[in-house]
Image (cartoon, rainbow, N blue to C red):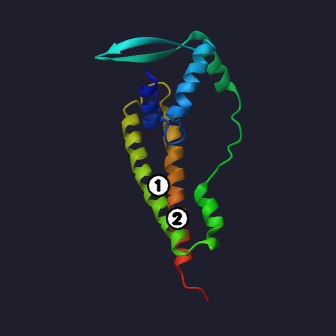
Amino acid sequence: MSGYDLRQEIDKTLGHFWQESYGQLYPTLARLEQAGLVSSSQQAEGERVRQVYKLAAKGRAKLRAWLAQTPMRHVERNELLMKLFFATEVDAAKPLAHLNASRADATERLNALRELGVMLAQLADKPGYDYYWATVRSGELGLEAHIRWCDEVLARLSRPRA
């Protein structure tokens, strides 16, 4: 795939739990090629010439070794929580607006993830389906929990104070 195609595929499949910007992707592809982990070739597509990358045998071996390692502990950076923590520094309407926006975004992403789950269900008889399902299900449960949390916090912050 070209870097552009790879980024689009990441957005469609892994995007609910892994993000890569073009600014991260292209330098990474260049480093992988320098290390002999991917190879690239130029392919003409109409008037455009695309740089297309392919995983090399050495790259596949490195990928398999990485997949066998225990994952690092996930440390979350959550801007919404940071803004809520310091919310007494702004007008009370601002945190409510942030929460409502976050809830709306989570609902939209949950709907998109459910659509992905329906598409992936067509692969139910393929090897690896249960792993794909696991990532989608994690995203669904996380977004459902976030929506419930937003509802709870919005209700609490909206109640009259004694």
The location of residue 138, given as percent across then percent down, is 54, 45
Q: Residue furthest bottom?
A: 162
Q: Of 127 and 50, which appears nearest the observer?
A: 50
Tell me the SS state at disc 2.
helix
Mark 2 nearby-residue class (10 Å; few <14, some 14–19, many ≥20): many
At x 43%, y 45%, the residue is 113
Label 2 amino acid? Cys
Instruction: Note whether 47 is above or below 105 in the view shown.
Output: above
Please give the label number shown on residue 150.
Answer: 2
At x 65%, y 49%, the residue is 76
The location of residue 108, given as percent across then percent down, is 40, 53
Instruction: Note whether 62 is above or below 142 in the view shown.
Output: above
C-beta proximity under 8 Å, tags 2 and 1: yes
Query: Mark 2 to mark 1: distance in Å?
Result: 10 Å
- Asked whether the viewer can see residue 26, the reply is yes
Precedes in sequence: disc 2 or disc 1 = 1
Q: Which residue is mark 1?
A: 106
At x 46%, y 61%, the residue is 101
Q: Of 23 and 117, which appears nearest the observer?
A: 23
Tell me the SS state at disc 1.
helix
